Image (cartoon, rainbow, N blue to C red):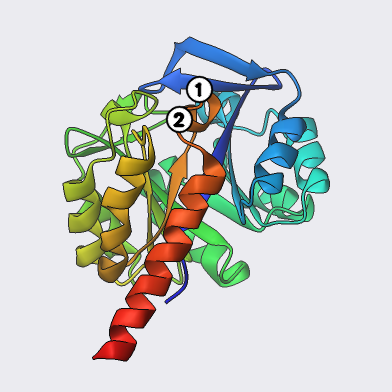
Amino acid sequence: MRDVLIIPAIDLKGGRCVRLKQGRMSDETVFSNTPEEMAIRWHACGARRLHLVDLDGAIQGRAVNTEVIKRIVAAVPIPVELGGGVRDLMVLEAYLELGLRYVILGTVACKDPEFVRRACRAHPGQIILGIDARDGSVAVEGWTEETRQHPTDLARQFEDAGIAAIIYTDISRDGMRTGCNVAATRDLARSTHIPVIASGGISGLPDVLEILPLQEDGVIGMITGRALYDGSLNLSDAIRACEESQKNDMKSDGDR
């Protein structure tokens, strides 16, 4: 098995790098007016993938921060994934043409599942399913609307669609530094054969270490934002912990 990825998040609003609390657009903290510089910083610390969110796009249902996204992709030589506002194939393909490795589909997965399947067929290995939940219910439209659908039910709909991964976010923990919802993440990972990336609430290295054992259940990475920006999590240390955990696992397997 590969190391669990630590994926820094760069959330874009009005062309700036911000972080929200529980997805509230009115509760933002600005961390940089030049998001591409943050991308360069995280790459220099060892990041092997970046996670972008077009917050304006998620609310407006269209691509908004395209120019900033283009600069970020050009600034770093590592895969970049993006979600927010992707509702049709034209926007999706325009993003891929910018050089994005993955596009995340969330709201449209609930409202037009067949579109997700078409996207997977057209761009195999490049579509990620974004599942954002609050109190066990999937939320859509930039987390402003809740559905009655459970995350595991949504995941099972796309079991054979060719989804590259699922990003699971517990909205109540996002940006709150209260720790990832390990139990819900484990339950989702065990319910599907699609690899899962954990998101929401990571506050420091202990939270990273708590997620690492979920690799056995199919968790391949974790996204973290605010903890990196406020300094409570050192990215290089987190990456090193993942690498050491993998080495220890390999040594244990060899001793059996």
Depth check: give the residue in front, 92 or 223.
223
At x 38% / y 64%, what residue is drawn?
A: 245
Label placed on residue 227: 2
Residue 175 position in % (x across, y down): 39, 25
Residue drawn at x 46%, y 20% as measured from the top left? 20
- Vertical order, 81 against 233 (above or below): below
Q: Which amino acid does label 2 sit on?
A: Ala
- Quarter of the figure that contains the C terminus: bottom left
The answer to whether 238 is drawn above or below residue 163 in the figure is above
Q: In this view, does 186 lie to the left or right of 18?
A: left
| Distance in Å between CA atoms under marks 1 and 2 | 5 Å
Report the residue that reaches farthest toward the top: 26
Q: Can residue 157 be seen in this view?
A: yes
> Tag on residue 46?
none
210 or 27: which is nearer to us? 210
Q: In the structure shown, which secondary structural element does the residue marked by tag 1 occupy?
A: loop
Q: Is residue 87 something one can see in this rendering?
A: no
Q: In the rendered image, which residue does mark 1 sit on?
A: 230
Which quadrant of the structure image shows residue 214? Answer: bottom left
Q: Where is residue 60 in the image (x, y as percent from the top left)?
A: 56, 24
Residue 80 shown left or right of residue 223 in the figure: right
Q: Residues within 10 Å of mark 1 (few under 14, many from 20)?
A: few
Where is the N terminus found, in terms of image quarters? Answer: bottom left
**For mark 2, does the 10 Å Cα neighbourhood hold few (<14), some (14 to 19), or many (20 or more) residues?**
many
- Residue 239, horizontal then vertical, whole percent: 51, 53
Judged left or right of residue 2, residue 245 is left
- Discs 1, 2 touching: Cβ within 8 Å: yes
Image quarter for residue 63? Answer: top right
Residue type at mark 1 is Asp
Q: Which residue is drawn at 77% across and 49% down?
A: 76
Mark 2: which secondary structure? helix
